[in-house]
Structures are given as structure tokens and as C-alpha cells.
Image (spheres, grey):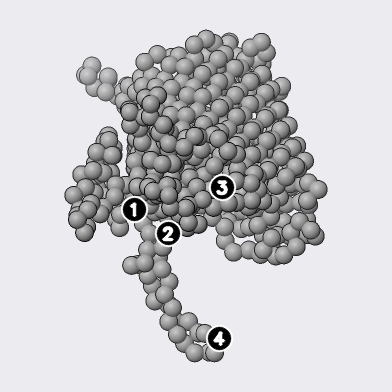
Amino acid sequence: MKKAKILCVLLCVSVYAAAQAVPVPLTSVRLYDFLDELATDGIIEINEATRPYTRRQVADMLVKAQEKNQSLNTRQRKDLDFYFNEFALERDTMPEKFVQWTDHNTFNLSLADPQFSYMTRNKIFKLQFRPILGMDVYGSEKGAILKRWWGAELTMDIAHHVSIWGSLRDVSYNGETGLRGKYFPTKADKRNGARLTQPGFLNNMSGVEYKEADYGGDFSDSKGGLSLYTWWGSVSLSRENIRWGDAWHCSNILSGRNPAVPQVNLQLTPVWWLQFDYFHAWLISNEINPNDYYVENKINTDGVMVTDTAYRPRSKYMAANMLTFMPCKWVHFSVGNSIVYAENNPQAAYFIPIAFFKSLDHLQTKGTLTQGRRGTQNQNSQVFATITVRPVEHLKLYTSLYADEIKWERFKSSNKANNPVSYLVGFDWGGWPLRGLSLKGEFMRSYIACYTNSIDAIEYTSNSYLMGHYMGDNAQSICAELSYRPIRGMWVALSFTDDIRYNQYRYLRGGIGTAIAQKPFDKKIFRNTEFAAKLAYEVHPNMYLRVEVTYNNARGYDNTTVYTIPDKTVTNKEIGEVLHTAQEYLDAFAPAYLQGKNLTALAGFSFGF
């Protein structure tokens, strides 16, 4: 009888602790900032190495913060109550809204910040539906760009162990009205001018895959998934963004900037001091597979039916894992590895969660002989680590290392070659001498060839967007931000960013040793300096008003792109040095709207995010 009672208690605890395993989007910036603030103040403990967090994890953090309510100031208590209400369903209660139609027990229809919530009386089934609507207006002397988006999101939780969620956002950039005259005289120029994000642009805006649109840029973003979970872990099939590596401005491991990808995800937290994350993702190669095509029937200009060949994209995948150790409250250490591969089908070996993928790659690809030499190249593997230290209250120090390849002999002073790695260091000082005040800083450097590969199909990209730091290889980024939260829901900040891209070196098999032996961070080819003043106010959960004023100076430099070769005496244009003008680099790395010196104002609002 005693054992039966203990079992019942354990089951009840398991059910209570297992709230929805729905990811909180990385775009919920203010919520993540609030959690970071509580962690820096020593109120809660979080693992910053892998994001997004799930709604279950966030609800648990808020409960722990509530347990230390006496340590919070008045504004933090109001923020906590605000987010407590946002995560009410995860705590088996109904949210309270400002203007609502509800019976307070099973459903809630909010009118001020549109949302419908439903929960059965036995709390076995929960549902939340929210429409999404937003608009940003960018304005400068070059004209105006209108960005608008609309859609909806739905989440469901079944029996405290199954979560289903989905969302759709239809987004458009319209620059036709404001981008006329000398800046963008043609339709194509107007289209490119309104597109502030492209794979080659060196900025921190989220990557997208545009649809055809002459007036600017249209794209849609559909995310969602299915998760099976309990208190100690979850397994899911989803399409979401991932950010790995502790960072404030942009991570150099997985930044989450590339468009979301379909993935199988596993997360385990069997004990409080250990977390394990793994995913296998289906990337978008943007590479044609010449052996995979459709035959299409069409009518030519003469009215005659002909056939055409429609080639399919090459398959591309990624597997990655991360082990996070939390031996004490003030230090977290994470280590992991990944592989990007382009086989015809997913490989079973890379579905092994705890594995060193480079070793598996050797087993998979070595041994093939072609014309007397090894003809099968390895796939593209990486290793990485991140360390977060909170030595004193109110201070966080962190660093992340991403390595494409490491050879110990390159650390010798006599060896001119550098390991193709990227490192990032940063700090966050907050809550002293004034609660709500925060000073952050971050410095990143990526060495030559750290994100590139000789095989285009297995580069560290998806949809042609780099999955690491947006500045790419042989680059440097410095950023700082002073922010303050004066009242509940309001956030003001002053920020500075200085991004520099140095001479490019193409990764050619047999010549990479020549490239990494060159002096890194030597000759500039692009630089963008930015000062910004920002204000955001969250009126209701996920209902934002924001204003920004930004000054930036984006410029290019006359320089060369070096295509590395084994024999330095070969200097023809195809594989030697190619001269590029400052404007060519500027066009390659910056949207037309932000080239040169610009004072840009932004005003926007959103329901949802």
C-alpha cells in the first residue's frame, strides 16, 4: 500500500512538471531578455548554450523566480506576473485578459490582444490560438520600405505528454513607392533595394527564401511540430530555428539566422547538472542534382508542345549534438560536434545521438579509389564548445569556439598556418548599481576558411545562408549595448556595432594550406559601423510597439579576392587573383538601401511577433 501511494505521488509530480514542450520562438526577444536578466541577478539558473527554450522550461523558470519574489524589485515583479499570465496554460490555469469573454474555467476569448484559450475541466487537453499581424516602416532619405506580415499560430497539449503546434506568417517587403529616382531606377533595382536580407549580405537580419514579386520581396514562413515529452526529456519532429552557443548579438556556432529547417530533435535532462541535445536536420542545398529531374511538357513561343527538363535540388543534411554540464550554479560548460553531408539519402550512422561524427564519416567515405587516388572526399564536420561563468552576482562572462579543423602543429610559432576556427567572447553586466540597467559587449573573430568548403553542396549553409556568424570567415565583429527597463514591458537601448570583412580566400582542394598560411585580418574589403537607439514596449503578451533610429556607414574597399592554388606561380584570372572594386564589394555585402551613410528611422507594431 505504501509503495502504491509513493507511485501515485511520483505520477502526479511527473504530470505537473511536464508542461507543453512547444518551443518559444527566438523572435520573442523581450522574454529571453527578461530570463537573462533574472539569471544575471542570480534569481534563476538557465542553460544559455542551446535555444529555443520550450514553454515547459520557461514556465519552470518563472515558478522558480516566483519562489524568490522577495529578491525582485517592483518592476520585475510586474514583469513576472505579466509572463505568469502568458504561461497560464502551462500551469494548468486560464489566462486573465484585459478585455475578454470567458467562463474563467474552460475557455477564454481575449479581444484587446486577440487570443483564444481552451482547457478541459480535467486539464487533459489544452488549446491556444492567436492571430498574428504586424507592420514595420523603414524611412530614410532614400525613401521608405514597408514590411508587413500576417498569419496565425496554434498550440495544443494532449494528456500532458504530447504537444502539437503550428504557425504561418506571410511577409512582404514593399519598396516601389519610396525607392524611385536615382537610387533604384529599374524594377529589378527596386526589388533588390527593398530586400534587406539576402544570403550574401553581412547583416544580422533573419534569412528568408523569397517568392517572385516585382514590387519588393514576398516570403512565407510556416513552422510547427509534434513533440512527445515527459519531465526528463522530449523527442520531436519540427521545423524551427536553432541557436547554439552562448551569445547576445549573434552566435558563431549556430546563429539561428538561416531559414528554419525540418528536423528530428532529442533533448534529455536526466539530472539537474546535465543536458543533452541532438538533432538531425534536412537542409536546403540550393544546388542542382544533374541526375534527378522531371520532364515537363510546355508550349513554346511558336505554339508547339515541347518537353523541358526541371532539375531537382541536391539532398543535404546535418546532424549535431551538444552535451552541457552544470557542475555548479556559476559555471556551465558545453561541448559538441556536427556534420553537414550531401548523400542521396539520410545516413543511419548520423542518427546515432551520442557520436563523434568525423569518425563515422571516415568509416562512411574512406576507401574509394578512382584512377589510382582516393576519389571520395570526407563530408564537412565541425566541433564546438561554449563556456558560461557567473563569477559574481550581476556579471556573466562567456566564450564560444567553433572549429572546422584543428591541427596541433599549427599552434607552433614556426608554423605560419592558422587553424580555421572562430571564437567569440562576451560579457553581460546587469542589475547593479540600478536594477533593470544592463551593459553587454561581444567580440568575434573568424579565421580564414573556417566556414567554407571545397564542395559547395556541403558548405555550412542552408538556403545559401551561413548557419554560423553572419560575418563569415576572415572577419571581425565588435558590438556593445547599454539597455534599461524603466517600467514593466518597456525596454530602451543604445547600441554600437562595428563589422569588418577582410580579404576572401576561396577553398580549393590542394590549395587550402596556402590560404590559411596568409595573414588573417589584414586587408579590409567591407566595413559597416552602426549606432542605434531603440525603444520597445510590450503592451500585452506578444503585442509590441517599437521605434528605432539607426545611423550606419557601410563602405567597400578596392582589393583582391585570392583563389588559392597549390602552385603560387600560376596567376591566371581563373585561379589567381581577381581585382574587385569597392562598389563591387559593397553590392555583394550590403543591401542598396543601407549602402553608404544612412540615417534610418523605423516604427512598427505587432500582434504575435
Q: Amino acid at mark 1?
A: Ala
> Which label number is shown at residue 560?
3
Image marks 2 and 3: residues in contact by CB distance under 8 Å: no
Q: Residue 224 placed where, x, y %?
A: 46, 47
Which residue corresponds to the image point at 43% horizontal and 71% vertical from the top-left?
310
**What is the secondary structure assignment of the residue under circle 4?**
loop
Quarter of the figure that contains the C terminus: top right
Query: Is 67 left, or right, of 1 in this rendering?
Result: right
Q: Amino acid at mark 4?
A: Thr
Q: Earlier in the sequence, mark 3 or mark 4?
A: 4
**What is the secondary structure assignment of the residue under circle 3?**
strand
Binning the other alpha carbons within 10 Å of mark 3 as few (below 14), some (14 to 19) or many (20 upward) gives: some
392 or 81: nearer the eye? 392
> Which label number is shown at residue 342?
1
Q: Amino acid at mark 3?
A: Thr
In space, the residues marked 4 and 1 are separated at their CA atoms by 38 Å
Residue located farthest toward the front when viewing the structure as drawn: 569
Tag nearer the camera, 3 or 1: 3
Q: Earlier in the sequence, mark 3 or mark 1?
A: 1
Q: Is residue 19 visible?
A: no
Query: Is 554 left, or right, of 312 in this rendering?
Result: right
Q: Earlier in the sequence, mark 4 or mark 1?
A: 4
